[in-house]
Image (spheres, rainbow, N blue to C red):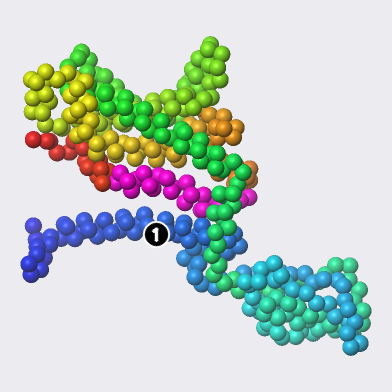
Amino acid sequence: MIAARIPGTKITYGKVMAQALLVFLVVVWTVPTFGLLISSMRDKDQLIVSGWWTALITTERNERGRTGTEAVERDGKFVIEGSFLEEDGNKSVKTWGDRIRDLGAYQPGESATLTDGTVFTLNEDGSYTWVSDVPFELSRGKRFFYIANIPPRFTFENYLEVLSAEGFGQSFINTLTVTVPATIIPILIAAFCAYAFAWMEFPGRQILFIVVVGLLVVPLQMSLIPLLRMYNGIGDALGVPAKTYVGIWLAHTGFGLPLAIYLLRNYIGTLPKDIIESAKMDGASHYHIFTRLILPLSVPALASFAIFQFLWVWNDLLVALVFLGKGDDQIVMTSKLRELLGSRGDNWEILTSSAFISIIVPLGVFLSLQRYFVRGLLAGSVKGG
């Protein structure tokens, strides 16, 4: 292989390309996340007119304002005063005009004589003065058009709107109630199954494992209706409601088991055979081998699946809608955020802030287990000695 030599080092073109690709992937993932963070701290007006990359730049927007109708007499003239920017003092007027096609006709502070002989002045801060020699005869105010300068503005209003929403705290607790058991239960079951597939001899082992692997390709959506009908049937037979936390725990367990068994079996199968045989010679049962040897050695694989399962269940909306009710004691955070958006998405600006609020817990889980993540993903790629 051709190599580019540097004193004291040896760097191949392959390594350079790999590092460049890694940097590219990091940028591809980081830039949108950074943009989402910036957008979450901008108000709705700014999000409408410009992208997050202009967050530090003053932007422009075409706006219109309508004057008042009440005039006061001053020095023999009739004057109407007011402001177009009373609701937002951060904006300023760049240029203005009395018609939409003449937005740049006048500068702030410049007076314009209108066709009816009145004089109108619009200042940079949005305040205006309209002067006439004769009394105004207006049923409604006159419209004027202007280009508004919108300076950068960052706020936590979007975060406060989400966090202060009624029932949001309870939905957070409900999500934890669903996610924690739905992560632990499949890990426990899959660990036992993976050990059996890897180190126990029983009829049909390979066939059963092939069936488990085949379940990985079954679409989740295909099984939702049959499972829900089965749950409803069991609930009717027992006289209990079908939409309970136990039901959704079992649903997530069933959906997560194929991947869990596959990952753990590949990892446990690569553990040194000598350790297992030595334990058997010492009289250890399969249970003791599993609990005292396999589980401690399988922490990387267990942690990897725990991250996958936790993230999937935490961010789930579809399964929660099917297997849980929408009452305050059951609604999960993803469903609650959907309600906050409104039926027509009127509060779409909270999507950015809600994304970061919902990611806090999964991010903490990932950072706490990330040292095992890569080791678990590579489970089975190298045969243990």
Image quadrant where one finds the N terminus: bottom left
Question: What residue range appears in magenta?
Answer: 346-370
Residue 197 is left or right of residue 82, and the answer is left
Q: Which residue is painted at 49% across and 70% down in the image?
A: 56
Q: Which residue is painted at 85% across and 67% down in the image?
A: 140
Q: Which residue is painted at 68% across and 77% down in the image?
A: 125
Residue 71 seen from this side: yes
Residue 93 is left or right of residue 2, and the answer is right
In the image, residue 120 sits, relative to residue 223, either above or below, namely: below
Q: Quadrant of residue 113?
A: bottom right
Residue 215 is left or right of residue 376, and the answer is right
Amino acid type indicated by mark 1 = Val
In the image, residue 222 sits, relative to residue 117, either above or below, namely: above
Residue 359 magenta-drawn?
yes
Residue 154 is left or right of residue 299, and the answer is right
Q: Quadrant of residue 313?
A: top left
Q: Which residue is mark 1?
A: 31
In the image, residue 98 sits, relative to residue 384, either above or below, namely: below
Residue 101 seen from this side: no
- In the image as oriented, which residue stretches furthest toward the top? 237
Question: For the residue carrying disc 1, how many other residues have a C-alpha within 10 Å: few (<14), some (14-19), or many (20+)?
Answer: few
In the depicted view, which residue is nearer to us: 223 or 37?
Answer: 37
In the depicted view, which residue is nearer to us: 359 or 288?
Answer: 288
Residue 357 magenta-drawn?
yes
- In the image as oriented, which residue stretches furthest toward the bottom? 75
Where residue 21 appears, as percent x and y from the top left, is 26, 57
Where residue 35 appears, as percent x and y from the top left, is 45, 59
Q: Quadrant of residue 298?
A: top left
Q: Main secondary structure of the magenta part?
A: helix
In the structure shown, which secondary structural element does the residue marked by tag 1 occupy?
A: helix
Where residue 319 appears, as percent x and y from the top left, is 48, 31
